[in-house]
Every structure is written in C-alpha cells, then in structure tokens.
Amino acid sequence: MDDLFQNPEDSIEVEPADLGSEFIAALTSSLAKKFARQEKKPWGSEQESELQEKISTLVAAANKHNLKSIRIIVTRPDGKKDSRELDVERINKTRSLQ
C-alpha cells in the first residue's frame, strides 16, 4: 500500500463507501505504527491492541457485506486515479492492510 499514497493532497475513496470510516481508522493506526518504527519511537501493547481492534472492525464490516475485497481509489491532484484491491481474507490473516 505504501506506493499507493504519494502525496498529502491525494484523495481517498473506498468501495464500498460505507467501509470508509473503518478503513481510514485502520490505515491511520497502521501509518502511526510505521512512523513509530521509522522514528525509533516506542509502539506499546496498548497501541498494538488498538490497531488490531481497528483491523478486526474493518474485517468484520467487510464480512458483514460478504465482501472478498475492498477497493481503494486514490485521486492525485492532477486528476489521475490509481486503485488497489485489498483481499479481506489476507487482511484478516496477516492482521495488516498490506
């Protein structure tokens, strides 16, 4: 997913749209963990538990809709769109957004 987001001005859409808040919550925590590692800052068990809870919430919401994947669409400032399919089963197994 790292290559999908290139610019803070990019806009993000999630399909289905009603999973947007769950995806953004999981993405935010995942990025916080990544930045903590890069900056050699501590990432405690409470933070990890919160991340795992957010991922579980995303997976549960996708499963509720019987989805096998979630589509993430990023629109660049120049209007170019890039998309990625995230496999729900893989998210659940790896406990990450990949």
Image: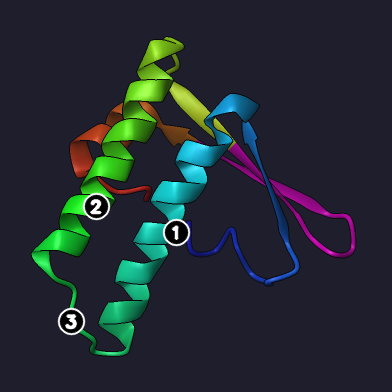
Cβ atoms under marks 2 and 3 closer than 8 Å: no
Cβ atoms under marks 1 and 3 closer than 8 Å: no
Distance between mark 1 and mark 2 Cα atoms: 11 Å
Residue identified by numbered label 2: 50
Q: Is residue 87 left or right of residue 76?
A: left
| Residue drawn where x is 60% and y is 63% of the image | 5
- Please, what secondary structure does the residue beneath circle 2 have? helix
- Can you tell which quarter of the image residue 59 is in? top left
Q: Measured from the top left, where is residue 97 in percent x and y?
A: 37, 47
Q: Is residue 28 left or right of residue 77?
A: left
- Can you tell which quarter of the image residue 38 is in? bottom left
Assign the magenta stretch its main secondary structure: strand
- In the image, 49 versus 39, the foreground residue is 49
Q: Earlier in the sequence, mark 1 or mark 3?
A: 1
For the residue marked with disc 3, what is the amino acid?
Pro
With respect to residue 47, does 74 lie above or below? above
**Residue range corresponding to the magenta coloring:** 72-85
Furthest residue in direction right, as rendered? 78
With respect to residue 14, does 38 lie above or below? below
For the residue marked with disc 1, what is the amino acid?
Thr
Residue identified by numbered label 1: 28
Which label lies toward us, 1 or 2?
2
| Residue drawn where x is 21% and y is 43% of the image | 94
For the residue marked with disc 2, what is the amino acid?
Glu
Q: Measured from the top left, where is residue 14 in percent x and y?
A: 62, 36
| Residue drawn where x is 48% and y is 42% of the image | 23
- How is this picture coloured? rainbow
Residue identified by numbered label 3: 42
